[in-house]
Amino acid sequence: MELANLQELLNSALKDISEAKNSDDINNIRNAYLSKKSALMSMFSLLGKMDPEQRKEAGKEINDVKVAISEKLEEKQKDILAKELEEKLNKEKIDISLPGRDFSLGGKNPFHIIIDEMTDIFLGMGFEVCNGPEVETDNYNFELLNIPRDHPARDMQDTFYIDENTLLRTHTSPVQARTMERKGGKPIKMIAPGKTYRRDDDDATHSHQFAQIEGLVIDKDINIGHLKATLELFARKMFGEGREIRLRSSFFPFTEPSVEVDISCMNCGGKGCSMCKGTGWIEILGGGMVHPNVLKMNGYDPDKYSGFAFGIGIERVAMLRYGIDDIRKFYTNDVRFLHQFKKKI
Amino acid sequence: MLVSLKALRQYVSLDGLNEEEIAKGLTFAGVEVEDIERMASGTNLVIGEILECENHPDSDHLHVLKVNLGDKYGVEQIVCGAPNARKGLKVIVARVGAKLPQVEIKKGVIRGVESNGMCCSLLELGVDSKYLSEKQTSGIEELPLDAPVGEEDVLGYLGLDDIVLNLNVLANRPDLLSLFNVAREVGAIFSREVKLPSFEGIENFKTDLTVGSKTKRCTQFAGKEIKGLVIKESPDWMKSFLQSMGVRSINNLVDIGNYVMLMTGQPLHMYDADKLPVHALEARDDYQGPFVALDEKTYDVLPNDIVIASDNKPMCLGGVMGSLACAVDEKTTHLYIESASFDGASIRRTSNRLGLASESSSRFVKGTNHFQSEYVINMASKLVKDLCEGKEFSNIVNYQIEKAEQKVISSSVKRINNRLGTSFSKEEIEAVLTRLNFKVEMNKDETFKVTVPLYRLDVTCDADLSEEVIRLLGLEHVKSELPCLDTTLGALSLEQTRIRNIRNYLLDKGLDECLTYSLVSEKEASKMNLLNEEEKYVLLNPLTDEHSTFRSHVLHSLLKVANYNVSRQAKSLALFEVSNVQTKQSASTHLAIVLLGNDYSRGLMEKIPYDFYHMKGIVEGMMENLGLEVSRYKFERLNNHLDELHPGKSAGLYFQNKLIGVLGELHPNKINEYDLGKNPVIVLELRLDELVSSKVSVNKMKPIHRFPFVTRDLAFIIDKDVEAKDIIKAIRLVGKGIVTNAEVFDVYEGEHVQEGKKSLAISLTYQKEDATLTEKEVSDAEDKIKFELLKTFHAELRM
């Protein structure tokens, strides 16, 4: 072996490296130039026969060539690996427009969206949620709410009877009486969402089954202003910050004074449109101050306590919010209708 | 209650107020005006006279008229199709440009002949056909011969220039079923003076009529005798008043009864005095037997119905309807007038039971003023004198057991303002109550006493006074202020939270949440009763058979929803509903689920047909959601509901050894019955009460295993009927302390497996808490397991 070949060897290796195309080429080059049996490596074995002076110099020269080849080879290998990976990834390209997996979310009947949302609003104000049976007694549904037997106010709510004393509740108000009974004269802040029934023929705006949220607050010094502010908060949360509410006198046997509550039209903002029949206002619920007779009958001293109560129609709110034109749609459960209501907020 | 503004104007000034303003004032004061109606309407109207009437050359029914419209408009040619058009007739003409309720009149050419206007019927001016004769509705209106040609205020001439408010009178204000009281109300709302007429009594002989009551249900009964009257048609003013108030004219006497009732709110009854057995009328409630009423029908009268009897014979079903026997007719000349007060509840029961509701009975039901009979009878007498030529009038005989005592209510400015959230002054409160005819005695310390007028039956306590104040002064004065109460925790109860969580879990799993009716038909109520057969609530008075029974289960309703959707091309459904159900024995909350077709949650490319295991998985996930461990519930094969569910693919869900749910594939016969297509349908009915109220301990963290685990798979052939749960139970028992998990990862039947056998593959995890496992420990455990499976289940190991 001649040391004089070193430069030639280096040139040849660099040429091979620059022409390498893939990992195999790299491996071949490494074998050819850097393996133990390669020409370069075998030169190291010649060093032992040289005199020390010469050996040192020759050793350095060989090593320099080796390092130069190794470095170039490493560099080239890195490039090639990067290129190969890139090619591999490019080949793995998928059609990202295909459907995702486990995407399905159930549609929630808007009736339930509204009940849950209203419940959450009042929970946020510190109300508790009370329940009562749908098959109710005459006593809770009427008598304890200041609607005695044969009172004409009973005609306001045509009733399904099971027997003389048992009926399907016509409103969620019996939960007021039940809660007052349970609280035994202590302050109350509750809502009661639930199904109610009246002897109405089903059409686009009437349903023999519908639902309400009842609200009742009893404490010392409660007045209509508290009802108004509570409902204002509710209306704004439910229908948007800009909403105003207005009260109109009305009559319910269990409240005195009684009010109907209108909210400024969410469609036109109060200017007047077809939705609010040009008035700018939409009737949304009824309420009032708990009638002193109701307090008395349910164990509260009307001279010490006062309270407000209200009842909101669930379907009505849902119909207004979502532009649903027929109350029967809630009860039909066409999945093409339900699937429009997947949004969580 | 219909209120004619023309009539109202006679008793209270409405100057400067239009109908919209009056309606708004009433509505905000709690007397809702439902509609504002015009009796008739039309512009460009004029009275004309037909000068010529020729047949249309090109029609067999049209006429060509020359109509004189007076000096201003001259003579116009009009083509008219009315059969009664003829020369000399005075008619209502809508000139070109007229706007009528239904049409706008344009100049036109009708079959080649020019026409400049239209001759009208009252129907075309918007008058309700119930007030018109057949002649009036089939042709043009025939005006009297003296009608002034050229008159342009045609509606005024006809007395139809009136606007009618339709008041929705609520149950607390029966006093407003009287025009006089509506005038008082309007006067109070708009601070206007109210002038109501007064009537002198007319009396020229003493009657031998006696009146009385043997029942507390009639507390007052006044009567008067009148002789020498003539029954005939009412004058035009009466007819047009009644028409504006929504009542048809019958004859002068009947019309007087209605007129007085509409004005005062007090219904009257008239007896033909010559037809009464004796000169005595007595209210009683002990009569029982048949009663032939004015409508010639016979009604069964029961004890507690109020009857007016004469010589023990029923002459009138008090407040509801008179008898045929003493009814006034066109020959009546001799009259007893009754003005009585009846117990509303009794009248309500009677009229509801017999299906006899009238303007009179509804006034008694809602409540009448018991202390105005003299006024009412005097008013009626005056009208009988004027309209019926009544000649002899007796004194009034009156039976009355109540004293006319006005209610006195004590209150204070502070109490009123406290209830309302307002800061009205004592002057404001005093003024507003005075406007409403309440007598106010205000004290220096701002306490006061209020005397309530007798016609205000609804005002009984100071809460009522606060309502009067606010409804007139306006609810806009209420200060909106959130209540400052003791802070309370606003949170759902445990049960409510868990129900919400279950619903959210199912929604997140892709199931649609439904809402169905609680009332089903009696037949439906017994379908798919998978959990119990308790006694159902059945309605006494259903509207339809379809909704007559309160359901005890939800699944049937949900299967109907499935049917609805399948018949509208839905191929796959995942539905659920959580609903209260109630029977005579119990009230509970049920969850029903229906799965049909394929699970598409991975898209069409990976659709998986729904089967039993989907439903089971949903339940297991739900249990995990509730924190209920596997050890607390189990699925057991069912031995009932064989007609409803697939016997091999159904199970009962037991929670703490109590059956709370049933799930499985719907029986093919049921799939047909519900018409759900060809796919399997998987159903569940589950009572949630036990689950949502169950106690769950707080999670305590367990340390994570420090030592590595080993997994080994076992596959073997066993009898088809051996259930995986038994195998796993056996493995866990034998491998206690070292086997930490055993899970089936493959089940196979078919080719290469003998008939009646199946191949089961189980993945086992071995791990020790305190040391790394050795190979030998794993092998030993595995051998023990294999031995046990061989011994107990004759499992044949596959390699």
Image: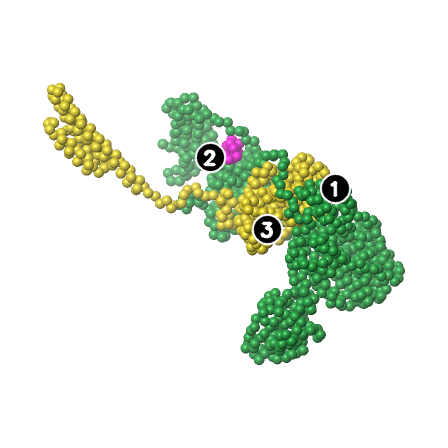
Chain colours: A yellow, B green
Tag 3 and tag 2 share a subunit: no
Tag nearer the camera, 1 or 3: 1
Residue farthest along the top direction in this orientation: A52
Depth check: B693 or B739 in front? B693
The label number, if any, that marks residue B446 in the structure image: 1
Q: Dot 2 corresponds to which residue?
A: B723
Q: Give the mark count.
A: 3
Residue B705, image x, y percentages: 43, 25
Chain at tag 3: A
Chain at tag 2: B
Position of B782 compared to B338: left or right? Answer: left
Please identify the quadrant where the N terminus of chain A is shown. Answer: top left
Circle 1 — which element? loop
Q: Is residue B217 magenta?
A: no
Chain at tag 1: B
Residue A119, image x, y percentages: 57, 41
**Residue B88 visible here:** yes
Q: CA distance from mark 1 to mark 2?
A: 85 Å
Magenta residues (range): B623-638
Based on the displayed image, in which of its 4 quarters is residue B194 positioned?
bottom right
**As shown in the figure, which amino acid type bears the numbered disc 1?**
Glu
Q: CA distance from mark 1 to mark 3?
A: 38 Å
Neighbor class of circle 2 (other Cα within 10 Å; few <14, some 14-19, many 20+) is: few
Depth check: A6 or B187 in front? B187
**Residue B315 visible here:** no
In the image, what residue occupies the spot 56% across and 73% down?
Answer: B108
Tag 1 and tag 3 share a subunit: no
